[in-house]
Structure formats: structure tokens, C-alpha cells
Amino acid sequence: MLKISNQVTIHESELEVSAIRAQGAGGQHVNKVSSAIHLRFDIKASSLPMLYKQALLKMQDQRLTKEGVIIIKSQQYRSQEMNREQAYQRLKEMIFSAIKRPKKRLKTKPTRGSQQRRMDSKTKHGRNKALRKKVF
């Protein structure tokens, strides 16, 4: 059971976890042991609330397929268990980032001092350009 929040959890049966051989260097050991984890999570068939599903499906992420399946590959560690935990953690982070609302921006006015500095710099720049003119 993967706990997302107090009310939202994902049951193990909804997650398709398979062990595969890791890529990269590792000598003879890498050819014998399947320590990398391939995690597949079907958003549409899951028991997540509709709000979560819509937010996840709207995401522009390379781990999300057109069919609405999240595929996470974890092979950082040499241990299968640690890779599984990392894959679960990355899935949780992906769900959190999908439902996170951006902070609303408050409109602010420039301060009087910043306006004055801006006008002074424009005047100075104009004076410099005026000095470049031909003298008659």
C-alpha cells in the first residue's frame, strides 16, 4: 500500500512492478542480477480521486504515455529493494507535483525610489547620447 496522503492511497495491485537487468558498468555482476525496477501505473484504471487523475493526465512529462500510464525506471542502487523504494518515492513526488497549485502572484507597484532611479538613469543615458552629437 503506497500512502499518498491521509485520505489517498494506492493499492499494491494497481502498481505493476517488474525487476529487470540494470544498464551500465558493473562487471560480471550486472549480467546475472535483475536489480533495476520498472514501475508501471495506469492512471485511468487506478482508484485515485478524479481530481488527481485529471491533474496527472494533464502533465507534460516524458514518463507519461499517451495511454495514461506512468512508467518509472529505477536503477540507481545495486539493491532491488532500494530501487523499488526509490521508484515508489518518485511516483509519490510526481503525484504531488501534479496536484500542487502554483502560488497566486500578488500585483505590486514599483516603489517611488525605484521609479526615481529609473528616470535618473534614463536622463543620464540621454545626456551621454547628446554628447555624441556633432558640435556646430
Image (cartoon, rainbow, N blue to C red):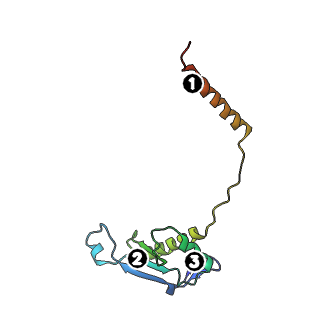
Compared with residue 48, is residue 111 higher up or lower down, i.e. above or below? above
What's the residue type where badge 1 is placed? Lys
Residue 20 is left or right of residue 2, and the answer is: left
Task: Name the outermost residue toward the top.
Answer: 136
Residue that carries the numbered disc 1 in the rendered image: 129
| x and y percentages locating residue 90 in the rendered image | 50, 71
Separation of disc 1 and disc 3 at Cα? 59 Å
Label 1 sits on a secondary structure element that is helix
| x and y percentages locating residue 43 in the rendered image | 52, 80
Residue that carries the numbered disc 2 in the rendered image: 37
Mark 3 surroundings within 10 Å by alpha-carbon count, few (fewer than 14), some (14 through 19), many (20 or more): many
Residue 63 is left or right of residue 136, and the answer is: left
Task: Name the outermost residue toward the right.
Answer: 112
Res 74 → quadrant: bottom left
Label 3 sits on a secondary structure element that is helix
Separation of disc 2 and disc 1 at Cα? 65 Å
Q: Residue at x 26, y 69 (%)?
A: 27
Residue 74 vs residue 60, the one in the foreground: 60
